[in-house]
Amino acid sequence: MFRHQKELQFEVKVDRPDPMLARQIQEVLGGQFDEMTVMMQYLFQGFNCRGEEKYKDMLMDIGTEEIGHVEMLCSLISQLLDGASPEDQAEAAKDPATAAIMGGINPQHLLVSGLGGLPTNSNGVPWNGSYIVASGNLLADMRSNLHAESQGRLQVARLYHMTKDEGVRATFRKMLARDRYHQYQWMEAINELEEKNGVVVPASFPPEAEKESQPEAYEFWNLSEGAESEEGPWATGSAPDGSGEYVYIKDPVAKGQVPNPEIPDTSLHHDLTRKKVFSK
């Protein structure tokens, strides 16, 4: 059960309207790494969580908080659009000074939402459910959550430097602080799950099940010009789980065969002869 509380989690108050900034903020509301994405991602992971209740509760707690962040951003966008009108956009085409202020307004803020936030990114592309990850594997999902919070916080930090509006910046600082804490939460959960089950997903398919393919799990194939990639810890030393030693393959050689596919039936109109391209 969800219950809406009228007060926002944090105060949202802008110094002055800024339709261009409102358009830019749409990216962290309805873009790929936005508040809508993490809201839906955490909630669906929580809805479908099986097993230890503490993980479900954490997912639901943070997912519910993200609902509040979506509302905060909608309020922020609405305040930045206060006073905007179709006439303003028409006027912007005439006067360079007005254009500097109003010329970047998102037409959908006027035509579609009536001066409110939209479930779209900064270019008007609708939010997409394929952005979210909810696989049912806790470690895989927590790693995806850490990635989402990292990208989202990065974008808010970039927006922070795109405005001098102290009211907007105050809201951003709250979001940056919460996104930092959420990264801590996912890192703690990831560490705990790795200690329980190991660092590789899924833990239920162990290295020994790979049988003759096990050596392939430790080889770094150098497939670019130069050998600088050998200098990284990913190319020498032990695997994080201690199951093997890395091997750097400086000049890798293909181990497979040349494909020799059958020519399709003529009714498929590939316009190819029945003659084999390669001989066995």
Image: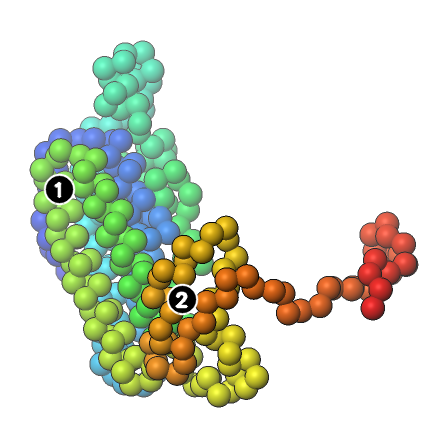
In whole angstroms, how far apart are the C-alphas of marks 2 and 1?
A: 43 Å
- Say if residue 59 shows up in the picture: yes
Q: From the top left corner, tell me how far across and down residue 34 is, in percent.
A: 31, 52
* 107 w.r.t. 93: above or below: below
Q: Name the residue under label 2.
A: 235
- Callout 2 secondary element: loop
Q: From the top left corner, tell me how far across and down residue 61 is, in percent.
A: 21, 70
Q: From the top left corner, tell me how far across and down residue 131 is, in percent.
A: 41, 57
Q: Name the kind of residue labelled 1 in the image.
A: Arg
- Say if residue 75 shows up in the picture: no
Q: Which residue is drawn at 86% across and 52% down?
A: 272
Pointers 2 and 1 in contact (CB under 8 A)?
Answer: no
* 177 w.r.t. 45: above or below: above
Q: Name the kind of residue labelled 2 in the image.
A: Ala
Name the quadrant of the C terminus: bottom right
Q: Name the residue under label 1.
A: 169
**What is the basis of the colouring in this image?**
rainbow
Horizontally, residue 128 falls left or right of residue 191, namely right
209 or 141: which is nearer to us?
A: 209
Reading the chain from its start, which is encountered first: label 2 or label 1? 1
Q: Residues within 10 Å of mark 2 (few under 14, many from 20)?
A: many
263 or 107: which is nearer to us?
A: 263
Horizontally, residue 59 falls left or right of residue 228, namely left
* 41 w.r.t. 93: above or below: below
- Callout 1 secondary element: helix
